[in-house]
Image: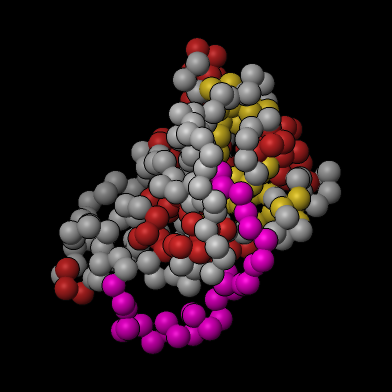
Amino acid sequence: MPPPLPEPQYSVRRRVLPSHLTALHSTQGTHLLLEALTNNSAAAYIPLTEHFCNQSDPAFCGITTLLMVLNAFAVDPMVRWKGGWRYFGDETVLLSQCCLSAELVRRVGVTMEQLQQLAVCHGLRVQMERPITHNNEQLFRTHVKECLQPTEHPSAMLVVSYARSALGQTGEGHFSPLAAYHEASDQVLLLDVARFKYPPYWVPVSELYQAMTWIDKVTAQSRGWYVMRPPLLSSSYKGVPIVSEERRPASLVPLAGQSVSRCPLHPVKIDFCQAVRPRNVRRTKS
């Protein structure tokens, strides 16, 4: 286990958003959102804001982002959060049956590959991309339009991994979901899961793409983005009204964190999990 991060030298209430980024709560930011909603280019905004939450630890940005996407897709965690509720109520539910321990993530964060594997373990279909060449900006733009202004009911979420410093912010690598696209100004709405640090904000697509080209010291590769889709058998995210509470006897559904020995694949999952890899480089928190 890597050592924990050192204690902070001073306390911070919040960070000041760089002036070239537009806060959602500003007059201009609200206007951009209203226009995006009117133009049907904010497909992910309502599903994500219904489950929008603050990362509970400075290193949990990737985990919290995935938690929001799983809840937006109404994925069943198969464990109980509190009482009888099957819901990703916090990051510990997501990590409770995972090979990645919460303490390890708390100390070093997660890589793009680890987050992809974790999403797949929870049933999502994930397409991970990196800006290998400058031509990949067009691919990113294609995914922006497919996810945020789909011709039919939205069936995918767009998550980005970018360098904060490239946008004039403090910190290094960070994960967050995109919620809307304003085509006239060519900006996307980024729902920053570090709500204690920066508000949701609009960022030009080209600037965000460039922020994803910066190299991650841990993997020696650029950062990038994901197109996350719900499980094939899921219909809860396709506009189908909820008509069932999907009740099960509580005795058959363990609480998050309880040992689940009934699963015959559990040892196999541990032995072959691709997310667990030794890492020697420490990661700066969000």
Residue at the location (67% across, 66% down)?
A: 280
Residue at the location (18% across, 60% down)?
A: 84
Residue at the location (49% across, 51% down)?
A: 60
How many labels were placed on the picture? Answer: 0
Q: Quadrant of the N terminus?
A: bottom right
User: Which quadrant of the structure image shows residue 212?
Assistant: top right
Q: With 260 as the anchor, is 140 left or right in this view?
A: right
Tell which of 18 and 8 is nearer to you.
8
Q: Residue furthest front?
A: 9
The location of residue 99, given as percent across then percent down, is 48, 72
Magenta residues span: 258-286
The location of residue 278, given as percent across then percent down, is 63, 72
Residue at the location (72% across, 32% down)?
A: 207
User: Which quadrant of the structure image shows residue 137?
Assistant: top right
Q: With 135 as the anchor, is 111 left or right in this view?
A: left
Residue 11 appearing in the image? yes
Main SS of the magenta segment? loop
Q: With 207 as the anchor, is 7 left or right in this view?
A: left
Q: Residue furthest top?
A: 27
The location of residue 224, given as percent across then percent down, is 68, 49
User: Which quadrant of the structure image shows residue 138?
Assistant: top right
Q: On screen, 17 above or below 139?
A: above
The location of residue 108, given as percent across then percent down, is 57, 58
Q: Is residue 253 magenta?
A: no
Q: How is the image coloured?
A: secondary structure
Q: On screen, 42 above or below 224?
A: above
Q: On screen, 35 above or below 233?
A: above
Q: Quadrant of the C terminus?
A: top right
Residue 160 appearing in the image? no
